[in-house]
Image (cartoon, grey):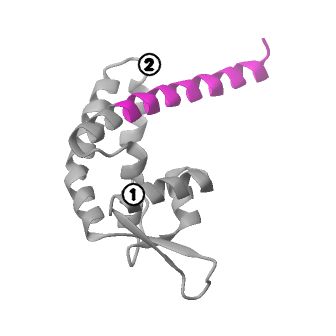
């Protein structure tokens, strides 16, 4: 095995570790959010992304990027959330082809109710992962990250 092969294996190992941590967190959040609020992780992600927007709306393509979904998956998800009364869509006044999405009062209320469950589950799952030797260094690295300043 060459040095180049070793470097590739180190990167692949890092990716596998990251994927394992993500899977652990995603599964725990999915169980908790579904049990308590009938929300999937991606639904929570969409509501949370919309809550951070000035004016409480986003273009559909921005929402797709924020949720790491394809355009068609975002459209289906937004339709489901709209049917539940959690968000609404409307045409952009400046560009009639653009569609904005925003939280409804019901969507904001559900997000605020679900946020403590999400945050507590995330904290508990990271603490659990920190006890696993293969995941502990990544959990430590996450703890060292500082949020970007606006």
- Does residue 129 sit above or below 1 in this rendering? below
Magenta part mainly helix, strand or loop?
A: helix
Residue 1 horizontal side relative to residue 61, left or right: right
Q: Marks 1/2: CA distance?
A: 37 Å
Residue that appears at 42% across and 24% down: 135
Q: Quadrant of residue 144?
A: top left
On the image, the x and y values in percent for residue 64 come to: 55, 57
On the image, the x and y values in percent for residue 104 come to: 31, 70
Q: Looking at the image, tell me whether mark 1 or mark 2 is earlier in sequence order.
A: 1
Residue that appears at 76% across and 19% down: 5
Q: Compare residues 6 and 14 and report the one nearer the observer.
A: 14
* Res. 134 mark: 2
User: Do we see residue 52 in this rendering?
Assistant: no
Residue that appears at 60% across and 76% down: 98
Give the magenta part as a residue range. Answer: 1-27
* Res. 81 mark: 1
Q: Is residue 10 magenta?
A: yes
């Amino acid at each position: 095995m060459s040095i180049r092969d070793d470097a590739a294996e180190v990167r692949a190992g890092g990716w596998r570790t990251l994927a394992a941590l993500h899977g652990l967190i995603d599964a725990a959040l999915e169980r908790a959010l579904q049990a308590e609020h009938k929300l999937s992780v991606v639904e929570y992600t969409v509501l949370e992304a919309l809550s951070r927007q000035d004016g409480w709306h986003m273009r559909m393509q921005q929402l797709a990027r924020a949720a790491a979904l394809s355009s068609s998956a975002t459209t289906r998800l937004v339709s489901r959330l709209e049917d539940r009364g959690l968000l609404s869509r409307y045409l952009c006044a400046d560009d009639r082809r653009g569609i904005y999405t925003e939280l409804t009062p019901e969507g904001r209320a559900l997000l605020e109710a679900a946020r403590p469950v999400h945050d507590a589950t995330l904290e508990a799952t990271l603490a659990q992962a920190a006890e696993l030797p293969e995941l502990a260094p990544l959990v430590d690295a996450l703890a060292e990250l500082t949020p970007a300043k606006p």
